Amino acid sequence: MNHVPKTQIETDFLKLGRLKIFSWLNPVELGLLGNALATLNYRRHEVIFRESEVSNSARVLVGGIARITCLNASNERITVAFIAPGPLPTLPSLPVTRFDFRCEAFNACRVGTLEWKRFDSIAVNGREVAFKKFHQNDLNYWYRFVRRTSSVLNLDLHDRVAITMLDLCDDFGIEDACGTLLTVSFSHKDIASIVGASRPRVTEHLGRMERDKLLMRQGRQFIVSTGKLSSSLMQAA
């Protein structure tokens, strides 16, 4: 974990302006936010924070990719989500838990923190607006998590893989002539970890989607036909 040099901070100001979570701030307010953020660098695999850490601050991933990990039933640490630049979700903090949720750096990351009360010095009703937006992001994140992993929704593995690919496209995709290009090269093992299945089974379902023209490969990257994939989920429901 290292402090960010001044030249990098100036670059980060531009990145903050591209984050949807701060779209309600004007350029002057974004500048105030950039100056107020306490920003640190994290190396690959370094722990950014743990479920046991209570914070009175907003956490923002300014650059890089983070991941949420936890312990599974076999006491193995697995990845359950990848996080794109933007708000970092609050992790569950329970009196008794064996999951040990962590937010880790998937690659080199820059993370900014700011106490909630300091948003009032950036914008009118800043604390209230920021807290609501970050809270909504938390709800969306954990809804995705439950949708992928809960047996209550009775989704089979094919559906869970499809939903995961759509979620990854939302967070890491850019529009391409052939569909949505995933700008990050996620492995079959990464996707298998997220959906809670073995790599061979996930490879089988990804192959089926490729045969059905729902996705294709460009080198190590996926191009997903999000419209067709969404329609296939609706038809299967």
Image: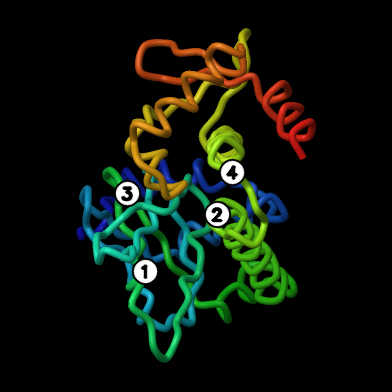
Q: Residues within 10 Å of mark 3 (few under 14, many from 20)?
A: many
Q: Amino acid at mark 3?
A: Cys
Instruction: Kindly identify the residue that appears in the image at 57 percent across and 24 percent down.
Output: 174
* Residue 159 point in image, percent of width and height: 61, 38
Q: Amino acid at mark 4?
A: Asp
Q: What secondary structure is found at the residue carrying circle 3?
A: strand
How far apart in space, not on screen, are marks 1 and 4 (Cα)? 25 Å
Q: Is residue 157 left or right of residue 231?
A: left
Q: Which residue is mark 1?
A: 101
How far apart in space, not on screen, are marks 3 and 1 (Cα)? 18 Å
* Residue 53 point in image, percent of width and height: 36, 80
| Mark 4 or mark 3: whose residue is earlier in sequence | 3
| Mark 4 or mark 2: whose residue is earlier in sequence | 2
Q: Which residue is mark 3?
A: 109
Tell me if label 1 and label 4 are in contact, CB under 8 Å.
no
Q: What secondary structure is found at the residue carrying circle 2?
A: helix
Q: Which residue is mark 4?
A: 156
Q: Amino acid at mark 1?
A: Phe
